[in-house]
Image: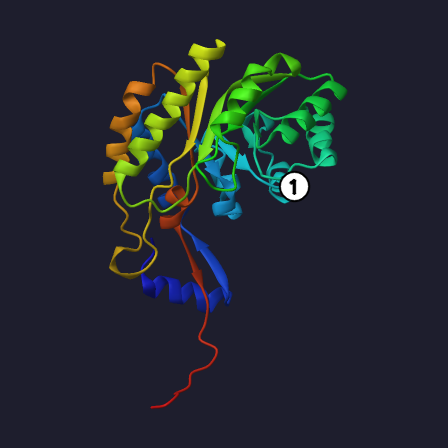
């Protein structure tokens, strides 16, 4: 990242508040991640982390996670390939889904947050005469996705949704994790769910999309000096799973945090109680 003196110079030239991005740093970081993980791991940029970087990310990552109509509109404006979009989000409205399917030809993959969403996606896909790819989102106990019992129910009745090709599962388990053991246990848990679905229902999960929530430091001496130590340990955990699934890692801040700063000016100073 740029030195403080250069940041101050640019702030004086362009005024504040301002966002300042080092796109060379961004490309360098994503490339380093690819080299550590291996080319068979696909990277998905969770664009909520920083939508300003969508255009720069088009040549760097394999997919974009999109969670709202506003984010989708940014992808349309920046001409992101529809095949590269993971249409996620806890709320999906029929009008928005029909716009995606009718006007844009659909996207690469959709996430299923609930039975209601599955039924909505089936209805929209049938109306537009499409067969879509989808991932069932498994909850880790938060508000995202559905529990294992509901996953079983949906998979066991998947023939009721002929316009949806369920490719596998997706899971977001939180961010800024500090210990690799937490991530290791989550991978084992997700792998176990897929094994159970295959054994009980003959369902072969072809894709595993996982948001590991690797940590980054924003403040103090560690800011802009985030190492890849935890990513290297994570890469080792992924190796046994590569032969079972196409693996997509959904990340946002871990990719983007080191490449940008938000610059503002001091508006006022005062002293209280000495």
Question: Residue drawn at (57%, 40%), measured in percent from left and top?
Answer: 67
- Residue furthest top as drawn: 202
Instruction: Name the residue nearer the viewer: 142 or 47.
Output: 142
Q: In the rendered view of the protein, which quadrant contains the C terminus?
A: bottom left
Q: Residue furthest front?
A: 149
Circle 1 SS class: helix
Q: Position of residue 226 (x, y in %)?
A: 28, 48
Q: Position of residue 30 (x, y in %)?
A: 37, 37
* 165 up-or-down from 18: above or below: above
- Residue 127 falls in which quadrant of the image? top right
Work out whether 195 lies above or below 173: above
**Residue placed under numbered mark 1 in the picture:** 69
Which picture quadrant has residue 73?
Answer: top right
Q: Quadrant of residue 11?
A: bottom left
Give whichever of 126, 30 is nearer the camera. Answer: 126
- What residue occupies the far bottom of the structure in this picture? 274
Give how far across and how far down residue 166 sits, in percent: 55, 18
Q: Is residue 134 left or right of residue 39?
A: right
| Side of 71 where 194 appears, left or right | left
- Of residues 173 and 197, the one nearer the viewer is 197
Q: Is residue 41 visible?
A: no
Residue 210 visible here = yes
Q: Position of residue 243 (x, y in %)?
A: 34, 14
Classify 10 Å Cα crowding around label 1: few (below 14), some (14-19), many (20 and above). Answer: some
Residue placed at 39% from the left, 45% from the top?
A: 175
């Amino acid at each position: 990242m740029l030195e403080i003196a250069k940041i101050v110079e640019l702030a004086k030239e362009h005024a504040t508040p301002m966002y300042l991005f080092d796109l060379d740093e961004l490309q360098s970081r994503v490339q380093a991640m690819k080299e550590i993980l291996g080319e068979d791991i696909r990277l998905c940029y969770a664009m909520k982390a920083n939508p300003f970087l969508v255009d720069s990310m088009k040549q760097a990552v394999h997919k974009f996670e999109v969670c709202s109509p506003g984010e989708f509109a940014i992808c349309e404006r920046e001409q992101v390939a529809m095949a590269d979009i993971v249409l996620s989000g806890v709320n999906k409205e029929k009008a928005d889904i029909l716009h995606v399917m009718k006007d844009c030809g659909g996207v690469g993959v959709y996430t299923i947050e609930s039975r209601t969403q599955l039924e909505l996606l089936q209805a929209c896909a049938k109306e537009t005469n499409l067969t879509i790819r989808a991932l069932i989102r498994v909850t880790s106990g938060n508000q995202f996705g559905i529990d294992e019992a509901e996953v079983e129910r949906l998979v066991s009745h998947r023939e009721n949704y002929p316009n949806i090709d369920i490719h596998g599962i997706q899971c977001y388990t939180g961010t800024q994790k500090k210990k690799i053991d937490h991530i290791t246990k989550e991978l084992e848990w997700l792998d176990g769910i897929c094994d159970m679905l295959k054994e009980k229902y003959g369902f072969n999960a072809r894709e595993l999309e996982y948001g590991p929530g690797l940590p980054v430091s924003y403040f103090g001496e560690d800011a802009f000096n985030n190492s890849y130590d935890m990513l290297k340990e994570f890469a080792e955990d992924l190796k046994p799973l590569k032969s079972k699934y196409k693996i997509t890692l959904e990340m946002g801040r871990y990719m983007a945090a080191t490449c940008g700063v938000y610059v503002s000016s001091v508006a006022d100073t005062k002293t209280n109680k000495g």
